[in-house]
Image (cartoon, rainbow, N blue to C red):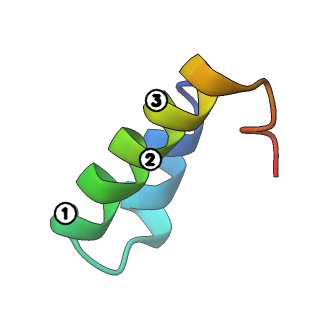
Amino acid sequence: MSVVIPAAVATGPSQKAVSDLTLKLSKTRQSSKMSVA
């Protein structure tokens, strides 16, 4: 779901938040397929 990154930027609190979210999603996705939430 790489669509979440541009969407977050468009809505976007800050670039750092997006980076953190991407990292978190990547980690979560690696561990589990629950990155949909």
Residue 15 x, y percent position in the rendering = 19, 63
The residue where tag 2 is placed is 24
Residue 37 x, y percent position in the rendering = 82, 52
The residue where tag 3 is placed is 26
Please give the count of numbered marks on the rendered protein: 3
- Is 19 above or below relative to 1? below
Hey, what amino acid is under mark 1?
Gln
Dot 3, how many residues are within 10 Å of its Cα: few (below 14), some (14-19), or many (20+)?
some
Q: Are marks 2 and 3 in contact (CB under 8 Å)?
A: yes
The alpha-carbon separation of the residues under discs 1 and 2 comes to 14 Å
Label 3 SS: helix
Q: Residue at the location (44% across, 47% down)?
A: 24
Q: Residue at the location (46% across, 33% down)?
A: 27
The residue where tag 1 is placed is 15
Hey, what amino acid is under mark 3?
Ser
**Which residue is more in the foreground, 17 or 32?**
32
